[in-house]
Amino acid sequence: MKTVFWTSLFLIVYPYLVYPLVMLAIGKMRPRKVARAPCLPTMTILIPAYNEVAMIGATIQNKLDQGYPADRLQIIVISDGSADGTDDVVKGFGRHAVKLLRRERREGKAAALNEAVRLASGDIIIFSDANTLFGANALQRIAANFADPEIGYLTGSLQFVTDGGNASGAGARAYMRYENLVRGIETAAGSIIGVNGGVDAIRRRLYVDTPPALITDLILPLSVIAGGHRVIFDPQIDAFETPNTDVSCEFRMRVRVALRALQGLTYMRKLLNPLHYPLVSFSLFSHKVLRYLGFVFMPAALASNIALAPTQALYRVLLVLQLGVYCLAALGLMHNLPGWLRKITTVPSYFALSNAAFAVAAYRFLRGDTLAVWQPRAG
């Protein structure tokens, strides 16, 4: 029983604390620099959208306001069956290099991008969500990274703009800050294996069609790595979104992302072979696989801790701590908590919510479900 407890506890902590420290050590011993330099490649920004009439105009204008040379910039908005006036807003930008690609049959982001990239004229393809606003000089910074021939794909620093009023918004913001920290560590060691999706870029010649049921945010960077190029994080490329403020919407989003990631890992399973891809397989297993299995280790740690509690004071203390974390997680789901209480419940609540979503995703993965389409954030 002790073996079950300590193994489960280690496997819960390992992906979030131990793995980043190992990668930090690798990056210190063998740092991988990025040879950035000013350059102006042709760019195409792809913006998949479904019923985004409230945000799509601001998103397009934000890209036009970047100051990138107009003759080297193309914007394609892919309307995936929108029925709320999104298309009309996009058409209003017709005097600029903005194209509308209307898809009557709604098939999701992967299918939308697969079609749109065939119309792209840029050497660099940039992906933006319909509700993502880029920070100043983001396009110039993206271009500078691709001056390094080793770089095949990059992601920027996505930040969630929220007042932190509930577990969903505050939790998403805290999680993204942590993810950005880990991505910086992974970049110094070689490549990252998780990207934002809302502020990404790839060399057009490295783009590969993604099966519609899979998640481009995982398949594309892993394909780039498999082809021998690096995938990096640049913290100076800022982007901003409003997170879900509805906990149930955030939960459904986490289920969808996790389900498609599990399917993506299966699709790209060759990268889990440590003989052919030692560092990549280590990162995938540590950063992705073990995280998605947290819902298995958590009840195992709790159940074994309960069994061990009568035997030793140490286990009684650890049981109190475990139960305390779960109580904070449950409390954090309540609305209108005082500010100080919100701060100490945010991480436990979002961690519990994410692992519950992983459990549902694993069940649906084993059942063979697919979730290709999406809904706009409930921000």
Image (spheres, grey):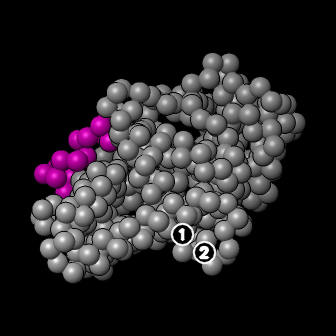
Work out whether residue 189 can be spotted. no
Residue 29: x percent and y percent?
25, 79
Disc 2 crowd rating (10 Å Cα; few below 14, some 14-19, many 20+) is few
**Residue 290 occupies quadrant:** bottom left
Left or right relative to 103: residue 319: left
Callout 1: SS: helix
Viewer-side residue, 286 vs 153: 286
- Residue 115: image quadrant is top right
Majority SS type along the magenta span: helix
Is 274 magenta? The answer is: yes
Q: Which residue is mark 2?
A: 341
Q: Is 261 in front, or is 351?
A: 351
Q: Secondary structure at mark 2?
A: helix
Q: Nearer the viewer, residue 71 or 342?
A: 342
Q: Which span of residues is magenta-colored?
A: 265-279
Quick check: 160 left or right of 295?
A: right
Residue at the extreme front: 310
Query: Which percent across, then down, holds residue 161?
Result: 69, 63
Foreground of the two, 314 or 195 = 314
Q: Are marks 2 and 1 in contact (CB under 8 Å)?
A: yes
Q: Residue furthest top?
A: 105
The residue drawn where x is 68% and y is 18% is: 104
Residue marked by disc 1: 345
Q: Report x, y in % for residue 35.
A: 45, 69
Q: Amino acid at mark 2?
A: Leu
- Magenta stretch containing residue 346, yes or no? no
